[in-house]
Image: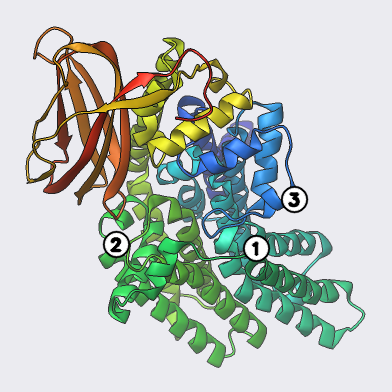
Amino acid sequence: MPQEKRENHIGYSLFLQLFSPTVFVWGMLLLMTLMMLWFLRMYSCPVPYVDAWIIAVDASAENWSWSWLWEQQNEHRYPLVKGLAWICYHTYGSMQPLSVLSVLTCTATSAAFLLAARRLRGRSEWTDAVFPILFLNGFHIENILWTHQLFFVAAGCLACWCGLYLMAKPESHRWFPTLLAALALFLLPLHGVMGLVFAPFLGVGFFWHGWVVFRQNSQNRIAWLNMAVPVLTAILCLLYVLVDFHIPGGHRENLASDITLWQRGKVILDCAAIGMGALGNRIPGVLGQGLFLLTLLTLGTLLFQWRQKQLSDEEAFSLLLILAAVWSLPLAIGIGRGVMGGAAPRYTILAVPLLAFYILFWIRFGTLGNIDSPHGWVFRFSRLLQVSFFTFFTAFLMYHVSMAMEYGKERQNHYHAFLADVQKALPLEAIAGRGWAYWCWNEKDFVHFLHRMKENGIAPFDQMQSVGLTEVEEIPLSQKSWNSRVPIAIPLEIPGGKRHVDAIRLTFQLDCDHWRSDTAIYWDSSSLAFPHVQKNQIKMGTNPYSGEWTVWIDAEVSRLELVPNTNAPFSFQLYKVTLCERDSTDEKSSL
């Protein structure tokens, strides 16, 4: 071969290698991982968020106990994440490293799916890049920044590892992947109710694989391991529900509600659709029904290929168990959240396994024939499904990035406001009154959590000073109930005219359809221009918000205005408004 042609041939070969499907899909995995780590670098902060406070105040304490590790939070037990949180606080000073573990767990799971797809086909395809996009897109930002949500992420990913193990032939298992899969199965119940729900069908699959090999060779130690680990996992599941387990009140109401089976079915499909990301959150009904139809088609194709002897008994049964396992979580969430409706974005990581295994199933179905075979439609549909999922998630990739950035910037804005209040040496009670609506469920809990973190010496909470507040006088109210479709201004006259007011405390109930309500207090020390404002985005949830709100004023005032603003029809009940005075400069343990 002439030198020039040889050089051109080498250059062309190098070009093909650099732009091969293998390089593309693994490059996409690296890119998505770096993107999520960048989100962490930009938007993570040491202030816990909502449920994370419960674990933070104990994990940041000097000592821990076995009872605390096993203790329920809502309906969940997650001792491993609690233990990791304790280690993080005592080595790093916050739980933020848990977020890094969440990203790396999703990365490892994406890599496992890339390897599985390559093993099934014998090669990688461009469309396999859908796997890292599925597990690492910006719609997962809530789980990533909400540090203790590692137990959500781990439950979904551990279930995936178990399912991938079951897609291999029982006789092909080797020691290392078996040990990893067995560990994943055993750890599932230690990551909340989600792991408890995933475990049964996957455990049956492990036992089945072990039994198949055991019948051929009773001395095979991998077979014994595959049969033993499900038994140990079942014992752990029993301990989960038998040792001091209770169903939280709100969930008992959901389970006991009289909503119709049709309504529960709709919520189940909505919970499956959340795996589709932002669009699954916006139009869950349509996508949920589409996933249900895809399930029927997948199930029918599986049974058809089994009847045609294209799938062995062992493989067909394994695929059925995986299908049952990945559907069990949307089913459980749908039943548990039946009254609440739909699924929050944080449940995405629990619905993604459903989509990932659909893609993998159809990759497998597509390898059982070709376009010219008698059942070529299976091959064609397999290609269509892979291209469709890849196109869908790629199309929404930048939108999910923008959503993540918007969510992260909101977190950072609130954190910087919180930090500014600390640096201005505002009293702990004032900081709590200004920030509880974003960081916590209610002000009373937030004050308690801040005191605990301060006592544990965790920055920046250790810089806060508490003055304590005492209610000294009630402000007369001429009206206590309002129903409106537009923002209203409720005047609050200070008894005796203009005077120094340390703080006021409102006891109220607000009911509206929006998730958050912008409710504000305006005041001024010299006129009615009201240049001073404190606005809290009160989280409504699915029920009316009922609680207290302390507003730190520390100024001469004669009049204030309360403005409930929901941008939607609302009902507002103001039970009382009291003037509060600081107790002293001494530290107080509570309000």
Question: Between marks 2 and 3, how big is the CA–CA gap?
Answer: 41 Å
Residue 559 located left or right of residue 148:
left
User: Circle 3 sits on which residue?
Assistant: 66
Q: Residue at x 68, y 41 (%)?
A: 84
User: Circle 2 sits on which residue?
Assistant: 284
**Residue 571 visible in the current orientation:** yes
Q: Earlier in the sequence, mark 2 or mark 1?
A: 1
Neighbourhood count class around disc 1 (C-alpha, 10 Å): few under 14, some 14–19, many 20 upward = many
Residue 473 located left or right of residue 443:
left
Q: Earlier in the sequence, mark 1 or mark 3?
A: 3
Question: Between marks 2 and 1, how big is the CA–CA gap?
Answer: 28 Å
Q: Is residue 460 above or below residue 490?
A: above
Mark 1, secondary structure of its residue? helix
Nearer mark to the viewer, of 1 and 3: 3
Residue type marked 3: Trp
Q: Earlier in the sequence, mark 2 or mark 3?
A: 3
Question: Between marks 1 and 3, how big is the CA–CA gap?
Answer: 17 Å
Nearer mark to the viewer, of 2 and 3: 3
Mark 3, secondary structure of its residue? helix
Residue 213 located left or right of residue 157:
right
| Residue 576, percent from left and from top | 23, 37
Residue type marked 2: Pro
**Which residue is more in the foreground, 469 or 363?**
469
